[in-house]
Amino acid sequence: MDTLNAPKLEQDYTDLPKSYFSHVQPEPMENAKLVSVNHTLMAQIDCDLNDEQLLDLLSGYLQQVSCDPLAQKYVGHQFGVYNPDLGDGRGLLLGQWRDNSGQAWDFHLKGAGRTPYSRRGDGRAVLRSTIREYLASEALNGLGVPSTRGLGIATSDEPVQREIVEPRATLIRVSHTHIRFGHFQFAASKGAAHMETLLNFVVQKHYPEHQQDSLEDKAWVVLHQACIKTAKLLAKWQTVGFNHGVMNTDNMSIIGETFDFGPFAFFDDFKIDFICNHSDYEGRYAYNQQAQIALWNCKVLATCFDGLLTEEQAQQAMEDFVQTYNRAYLEDMIAKLGLETVQNGDKELIGDLLVLMDEFQVDYSLFFRRLAKWQTDKESELFELIHPEQLPVGFSQWFDKFSVRVEQEGVDLSVWRERILKANPSIVLRNYIAQQIIEKAERGDYVMLNEWLIALQSPFEEHPNLADFQQPPRPYQKGMKLSCSS
């Protein structure tokens, strides 16, 4: 390799103590081929790697792009149980790409092979799981939800054993950071010096205006911002009907981005206690538990700063989480209803609606999108989602209250309908759609994958070419539950 002219990724993670990582080379994926390239993301981060160079990174050969890959060490609570043996078990942080403004973007190769933290796993990823993460992260980003993203996917004919034998694949995950709550749990277990180093590292990268603060003040900034950003993230998850499935502390980003996609699901019919992960036997990560679990995770994070923060400060951060979440969720939900300013009674209006949607198993995303048809000659398309024959009394009463509330906005109904369409997507990455895309891709047909990648980047447009996917799914297509291997 001509190292003088080769593109290069920086590696700032080596500024941390050696116990935080292990230098590991990927296990190359032979006969690799590109499946998809996220050209939109490439342009946004000023990434000028060509397909050959991108495939070099994705395949793990690293002959055309200079980088210093490493596997990160962290710990965490998995389903509420502390596990000290965690780390990057199937991924490697390749380094950072800098855009034209100087912003650094982590490039992380998922499916890179075994590392010291693989825990008897093979370190591989399969085409199914990489496609799911690739599309889900783009779907959330398109909906305005903070998320890691995927730069591209490659696959090969190398077999990988999961529940069945599947083709190997890799994904380059792009993020502002790969520091998780679990990193701070690891630092706390190593002592004060390690915590100071990690705090300085995170503050320098993400809160540079606080670099001259005391260590105690830095601890407050990192904890408080993690709580605020996580609260806003959870409000958006709940609003768009996203179920994460594995909200372990090692899957929580310190800067509030959606991180580590496994058995996720966007709602079909609304179900308040929906569980998308069939491994979650007790419903710890059910939809109606997500905000509480996020708060629990923040409390775990707060314990990492014992000795740097007082109990009062930790409690204040948790209270700010609750207040931020409640405010953000209410604001996001009234926007889905085409409303702009929060008024007395809005919380009850939303709560009553969700109770009714749960009772009558109403399609979540279609209801809000078709709400724009209310009081038009296409109103029946909305009401048929609720009941095919007659609108239930409870819903009829709710619409009476809603009519009064819309009048209070003081805007023309045409303006209100425009708000609805701007706040509610026409397309949603339902699990049955993702499965169709996966099955085609496994046969070597990537057209649907790339079509949906582009469409999910502008989910509020009409997308008439995807009209078949804008109808209620059939009963057998609904409510798919997936495992952590997803």
Image (spheres, helix red, strand yellow):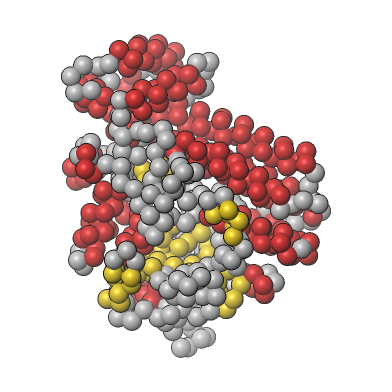
Residue 314 % position (x, y): 73, 42
The residue at 19%/46% (across/down) is 465
Choose between 231 and 305: the one closer to the eye. 305
The residue at 56%/38% (across/down) is 292
Residue 485 % position (x, y): 39, 60
* Image quadrant where one finds the C terminus: bottom left
Residue 479 % position (x, y): 30, 42
Choose between 463 and 241: the one closer to the eye. 241
Q: Is residue 318 above or below residue 100?
A: above
Residue 335 % position (x, y): 44, 29
Q: Is residue 276 visible?
A: yes
The residue at 47%/32% (across/down) is 332
From the viewer's perspective, tell me whether residue 127 is left or right of residue 284: left
Choose between 279 and 337: the one closer to the eye. 279
Choose between 205 and 193: the one closer to the eye. 193
In this view, the residue farthest toward the bottom is: 1
Asked where in the image residue 101 lies, by quadrant, the reply is: bottom right
Q: Is residue 394 above or below residue 435?
A: above
The residue at 72%/59% (across/down) is 188
Q: Is residue 101 visible?
A: no
From the viewer's perspective, tell me whether residue 455 is left or right of residue 219: left
